[in-house]
Image (cartoon, grey):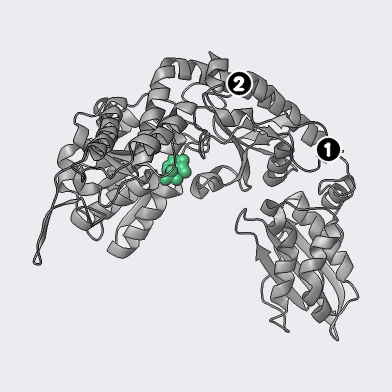
Amino acid sequence: MHNDVRDMYREEILEHYRHPMNFGTLKKPSHTISAANPLCGDRITLQLRVEKGIVREVAFEASGCAISIAAASLFSEWMKGKKLAQVQKVGEKKTQELIKAPISVARIQCVLLPYSALKKASNSTSSELTRPRKLG
Amino acid sequence: MMNSIRNQFPILKTRVRSLPRRGGAKSLVYFDNAATTQKPEIVLRAMDKFYRSKNAPVHRGVYTLAEAATAAYENVRDQVRDFIHAAHREEIIFTAGATASINAVVAGYVETSLHRGDHILLTDMEHHAMIVPWQAAAERKGLEVDFVPLTSDGRVDIGVFKKALAKYRPKFVGITHVSNVLGTVNPVREMIAAAHKIGAIVLIDAAQSAAHLPIDVQKLSCDFLVFSGHKLYGPTGVGVLYGRKELLERLPPFIFGGHMIEEVTREKTTYAPLPAKFEGGTQPVAEVVGLGAAISFVQGVGFNAIQKHECELSAHMLKGLKVISGLTLLGPATTQGRIPVFSFTISGIHSHDVATLLDREGIAVRAGHHCAQILHSNLSPDASVRMSLGVYNTVGEIDRTIAALHKIQEKFYA
Ligand SMILES: Cc1ncc(COP(=O)(O)O)c(C=O)c1O
């Protein structure tokens, strides 16, 4: 099949799907947030440890398609060490940029899934009481 | 025969080119027929011709054109009567589709014949179009909705069904003729007989069967039966509600307005007799005409030929799917008692990825829960890929799809 650099199924993306970065849970998260894609039921649980407004640690667990897992992998890696407020502000655009490929309209929700979770953290400075679930 | 059938469907000549642009354009493989079928020339032409030469309101004008439109519309009622072997033409009501038909029956029954605490029996195999109207009605009226569980391979067992009848003593039973996820054909005749023994009224959802199996409402002895035109090679926006005459006569109208009345005064309205009572407002005449043409198309091919061809497709598909490692087919892997609808999961590959990658090969399939979440969660925690075939699909298209699935696996498992 295709292996164009700008293909959303290029090898780099599939590699993130097979071996996602930051997959798992944190020992002492300050934020635990979940989001689901109503179209397909895919879910993600995102955990952050935020110190003085800076994202120090991040982890996620998810069941989903290659695109949503790869997006979460890339996005979580990117946000480490950045200000939470900043990450939330540019997150929607950034998640799409990180995939580096045109995304069909039908699949855009998959890419945005980790951001939908992160967005919810903006409204709660304290942690939400969702317990992370082992998914997939 | 195959080529002459395919040639009647202009859309099947489409060449698809999807991103990323590699290789030449590919011919479209349309495997989403359970969602909606493509339309043959005869349907497109009938609708076009109606608008060009017969368009007028039906049942109202006294002029020649309106008479021609009315005749075209009413002829289709006779065609449908013949198609499903109803006893009377006024037992055929045109609606907007299967969903609209089910909603009409539910609303009417709830209003006139059901009371708090009454039970409604459905199966775990139902489409949301059957489940949701009953659940909404149950909430309003305090009814109980019960579900017949399926066997582990996703079939309705007649013994289990009879037990549920005895246990719940339902007033009303709703059954899908064929599963839109598994393609399995339910033993509706036996189920109807059993339900009638305890005095229940039975509604058959024939949305998935109408294009694949002959239907005889009198032999089935069902009380109500519904289907949509667009899954039968006809247009969207039109469907059928069949009801036994004496039941339809007792059922209240569900759309109030023009044409469905006998007399309107300031004090009171009396309703028109069947079938007008249920056809309030200006009807989708061109769509009804298109439905008539679709029925002519299906009858022209003939159910014997359709079933023979589709059985071959099923056998070929099942053989192909069997050799794909990690593939789990939902429901039974037999050619008997099924239509060519196949839902599956592949371990390690999400169904949306499979669907997107098949799309790149020009193959249109569906991914998700297929509007049957209860059935789906019984059989698989994950969304599945559904391939649903119709009369114009070929063994060659199946081979192309199986090859594409192998390629997707190579890519993912690399
Ligand atoms: C079994 C079944 N019942 C009902 C429906 C509803 O049909 P429609 O959407 O045409 O009203 C469908 C298809 O969507 C179906 O597969």
Q: CA distance from mark 1 to mark 2?
A: 26 Å
Residue B59 lies, with reference to residue A44, above or below; the image says: above
Who is closer to the viewer here, B127 or A25?
B127
Farthest bottom residue in view: A52
Residue hosting label 2: B394
Dot 2: chain letter: B
State the image quarter where residue B134 is shown.
bottom left
Place of residue B17 in the rendered image (x, y in percent of width and height, measured from the top left): 74, 37
Residue B265 lies, with reference to residue B65, above or below; the image says: below
Are callouts 1 and 2 both on one chain? yes
Badge 2 marks a residue whose secondary structure is: loop
Q: Which mark is residue B411?
A: 1
In this picture, residue A127 sits left or right of residue B380: right
Q: Residue at x 24, y 52 (%)?
A: B109
Farthest top residue in view: B1
Badge 1 amino acid? Lys
Place of residue B268 in the rendered image (x, y in percent of width and height, measured from the top left): 10, 63
